[in-house]
Amino acid sequence: METQILVNGLVLGALYACIAVGFSLVWGVLNIINMLHGSLIVLGGYIAFFAYAAFGLHPFLVIPIAGALVAALGYVLQRFAINRVVTQPVLTTLTLTFGLDMIMYNLMTVAWTATPRRITLDLGRVEVAGLLMPVDRLAAMLLAILLTGLLYTVLRSSRIGRAIVAVRMDRDAAALMGIRVPEIYAITFGIGAFMAGASGCLMAVVYPVTPNLTGLFIGKAFVVCVLGGLGSVPGALVGGLALGVIESFAGHWLGPQHALTVGFALMLVLLLVRPTGLMGVRGYE
Amino acid sequence: MKRWPFVILAMVVVCLIALPYLSSNYFVRLATFVCLFAALAQSWNFIGGYAGYPSLATAAFYGLGAYAGAICQNHGVPMVLAWVIASVVVAGFTAALGYAVLRLRGHYFAVGSIVSVELLRLSLSAWDSLTGGGGGLNVPIFPGGPQAVGQLFLYVMLGVALMTLAVTIAVDRSRLGFGLRCIRQNEDAANAIGINTTLYKIIAFVLSGTFCGTVGAIYASWTSYIDPTDSFNIVLTLKVPVMALLGGAGTVFGPAVGAATFVIMEEVIWSNFLEYNRAILGVVIVILIFFLPGGLLNIRLRRRAGPQEIAK
């Protein structure tokens, strides 16, 4: 029984990690709390839903398309709007992204209504060593880990990735080395949005798609970021898995209504005793 | 400080007092909301404007005040005493929370304060026996009919708003206000020149929380029904700083002016573009950030405050 709860938590946790990693990247590199992130995830979910409803495409196949579309939106928003205030205090940038989030939330609600839409893919369950797992969740978890790993590789070994890491470590020095910082900001935001769109496709398999879930997603991203430590891909993975397991056990022992509370309470405590998170890493090395 | 802002303030107060005799309940209700948000924005100003700490905990204080007041009233405590008890409860909560989260700065403080809203919402929703859980809580309706009740609560909210304004003026002119402005500009330097930054920040935070608690408790008595999602509302927690920024954060009258502008604008938008109200508010926020970074009052006030601050 305990093992089953642990596995359930890990599956959920991998999805949380995928939700949070883009948010964490943007926070770490741009120093922005991106309140839009939840809406970008839901937008990715809608793209997956409509691709499924219109062409019968499996949500997992839509990931590159949805990711690219949401990334383009993110790039444009950062390039032409957020870049103008990116160096200002947190209240300004947070308020701006919240304003943009209100616009996006409203447009999505009007266009597609708040009615939850569900993609039903019954792929059955597998049983391994006495543990029961739905196949779609398991596949979503593997893809989430794959995407997170992909992001890690891109940041580590591509030119753009090295430039992003450089900007995160020291903006001024990076500018002196010939890196165009505003461009890197826009690309970073685009990558964060790509991860949001992609995780939206994954979430569409597990949760119904509705604008009302934006708050839930952004809440998870907050907690995972603080648990795992800001701006580090392995940190987001550790934080996500930790949150998934904690919620799973808290739900079992204290009742499902307390699962969220425990996550937030733990986050607040961790914020006070160790603001760098469990994996206090400085850059994306 | 010049005299003309007080002349305008006196005129506004006279108009608000006369309002119930001149117009319908609709405008009385609107005016009550203006006073409610003016009080909230003025309270936020202590920590967010003067000390420059991006507090997003307004809804936590407001909701806690609403619940404390409602629970007291449901246990037979007279209404006004319930408001006082709620304010004291929230003051205690704010002091404890402030002692913990005010050690954080910038983004971490913002996230810590926003999480306190969620944490309180979830805890109070889960505590069924005391709070009625997600179903909400009824508060005894104040007798006397809608007309008289509307008038009473307008006056009460106006009173609280004026109280926050009076405290703002007192703080602005005191050592505390000077210390808080120093903290906003450079906390380490403020600490080095002998300002007890921890104490000052906690005082500002408690001032900010207490009045929000009072307003929440009065709101609960006014509407006679509260529920967790409405009381601990993330939109509220962001709307109040936006109002203060709109008027001019860190100025004496800015938050109240911003609140009045925002509430009236929101009302017009609600009644004309019901479906797009949230998007239009978003556009307003974006415009505010890009074109009015200092707020409505700030350009004039900054010029005036310059020599004054040096004189202090």
Image (tube, helix red, strand yellow):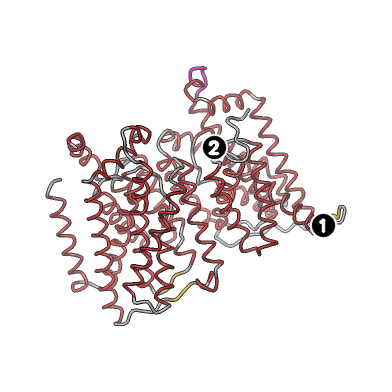
Q: Nearer the viewer, residue A115 or B132?
A: B132
**Chain letter, disc 1 residue:** A
Q: Which image quarter is the N terminus of chain B in?
A: top left
- SS at mark 1 in the image: strand
Q: Nearer the viewer, residue A133 or A59?
A: A133
**Dot 2 or dot 1, earlier in sequence:** 2
**Circle 1 residue:** A132
Pick out the residue farthest to the bottom. Answer: B144
Q: Which residues are magenta?
A: A175-180
Asked whether the viewer can see residue A134, the reply is: no
Position in image of residue A213 (x %, y %): 57, 56
Q: Amino acid at mark 1?
A: Leu
Q: Which image quarter is the C terminus of chain B in?
A: top left
Q: Amino acid at mark 2?
A: Val
**Circle 2 residue:** A26
Q: Nearer the viewer, residue A135 or B231?
A: B231
Pick out the residue farthest to the top. Answer: A177
Give the answer, above or below, for where B267 lies relative to A72. Answer: below
| Membership of A221 in magenta stretch | no
Position in image of residue B287 (x %, y %): 36, 44
Asked whether the viewer can see residue B251, the reply is: yes
